[in-house]
Amino acid sequence: MDHEADHEAGHAARRHALVALLKERQEVGEPVAAAMLAVPRHLFLPDMDPEEAYRDEAIVTKRDDEGRPISSSSQPAIMAAMLDQLGVAPGHRVLEIGAGTGYNAALLAHLVVPGGHVVSVDIDDDVVAGARRHLSAAGTSSPVEVVCADGAAGWPERAPYDRMIATVGVWDLAPAWLEQLKDDGRLVVPLDLRGMQVSVAMERSGGHWVSRSVVPCGFMRMRGPFAGPEVTLVLSRDPDLVLALPEPREIGDVLTALDAASTDIATKVDMSSPAMGTGLSLWLALHEPRWCVLSGKLGRGYGVTAGIVEGDGIALLAAERTLVARGHGAGGARLAAELAGHIGAWDQAGRPEAEDLRIEAYEAPTPTPGPGPRTGPDAGAVIGKRHTKLVLSFP
Ligand SMILES: C[S@@+](CC[C@H](N)C(=O)[O-])C[C@H]1O[C@@H](n2cnc3c(N)ncnc32)[C@H](O)[C@@H]1O
């Protein structure tokens, strides 16, 4: 018995340490911190050492036949940030798309009591069974219901919802979600912006949707008919190199280009924080149609970088003393010059970060509004999706 009590005390101490670490790095609202202190994450990751379950890391729990992660417990830092964006209150009815381990559903359950209800949907029945098991082991089966369905249809049985959250990357806003949200409801989703992802909290404003907050994030993508057109090309397995494009497009032999000598164009922009890297990548994604993201074994370690790819070469961002545009292949020098031009434009615009982005979503077939008299250095970009049109600007 004492042994058991010692274990529990150890887990509680680990939860405290995790929440303290998150609070050092980001703002964490008190209700969300209290939920994280109360819910035992290790019971949602029963196959791993509890010590590891309380690290601020995403933990992959299922892969497809080719080894790609298809289910996980997301990184606690982004879970806390998204729950803060969501602003759940006692009594709320909440829909989650992507039950995974059930841990986030348990945090939501903690936030909605007394009186609220949580429905969490996952597309895989084995994942649903696992989430139910974990919730029951943690003693939180009651205001949570885990159901197996394609989350694109929402869950009309319990609609309307006060809050809706996707914990899987979405390419578009599903009409069902918008229909099933109350008029004053809020939706938080990891939204694809031409291959970059941001967690955006959206609310209705007149006849359309407007972002209330934006946080950079990186979630595995939604599966099923609602998946987006992004392309992930495995360039090489050893060393591990993956190229992502926002949509299918003809490109050249990138691996051979990367092996060729490079042309560097150094800029005057120093990269003082990783947040700037996300801001610049987002800027490129919104302004450069030939945009790509390369991840894997880059230089001495694993990393991610962005750039421009064409038939005759690729140019990528590199961080030396200052930011460098590095071109490879026959067209590398030309592409590096173009990439350096984008870095200059982002610098001129005041180096906007992801958090500065404003996103408006118009439900089709509403005609896309003209750019209108926008103030600020950037007139905004329009991204057409299947069901919505997004208008983006750095005000
Ligand atoms: C990152 S995990 C969710 C993490 C989870 N919230 C947790 O706390 O452990 C993403 C989940 O989304 C699910 N998913 C993928 N496509 C889906 C879809 N179309 N509908 C519902 N769930 C989906 C996956 O099966 C996976 O379990």
Image: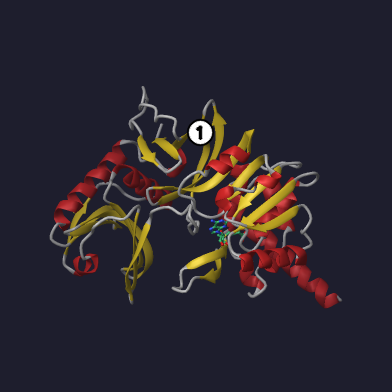
Camera-nearest residue between 322 and 284: 284
> Could you classify mark 1 by the number of other residues whose Cα lies within 10 Å: few (under 14), some (14-19), or many (20 or more)?
many
Instruction: Look at the image and tell me whether residue 170 can be seen.
Output: yes
Q: Is residue 46 above or below residue 245?
A: below
**Quarter-of-image position of residue 394:** top left
Q: Is residue 303 above or below residue 357?
A: below
Q: Residue at x 17, y 68 (%)?
A: 260
Q: Residue at x 67, y 49 (%)?
A: 32
State the quadrant of the C terminus.
top left
Q: Is residue 189 above or below residue 372?
A: below
Residue furthest to the right in view is 1
Q: Position of residue 231 (x, y in %)?
A: 36, 59
Camera-nearest residue between 78 and 234: 234
Q: Is residue 352 above or below residue 110?
A: above
Q: Position of residue 154 (x, y in %)?
A: 60, 48
Q: Residue at x 51, y 71 (%)?
A: 63
State the quadrant of the N terminus.
bottom right
Judged from the image, the secondary structure of the residue bearing numbered disc 1 is strand
Q: Position of residue 51 (x, y in %)?
A: 64, 71
Q: Is residue 94 left or right of residue 309?
A: right
Say which amino acid is labelled 1. Answer: Val
Q: Is mark 1 within 8 Å of ligand 1?
A: no
Camera-nearest residue between 193 and 25: 193
Q: Position of residue 156 (x, y in %)?
A: 65, 45
Q: Taking the image as four quarters, which one is ligand 1 found in?
A: bottom right
Instruction: Look at the image and tell me whether residue 357 can be seen.
Output: no
Residue furthest to the left in view is 330
Q: How is the image coloured?
A: secondary structure
**Quarter-of-image position of residue 6:** bottom right
Q: Which residue is mark 1?
A: 210
Q: Is residue 235 left or right of residue 83?
A: left
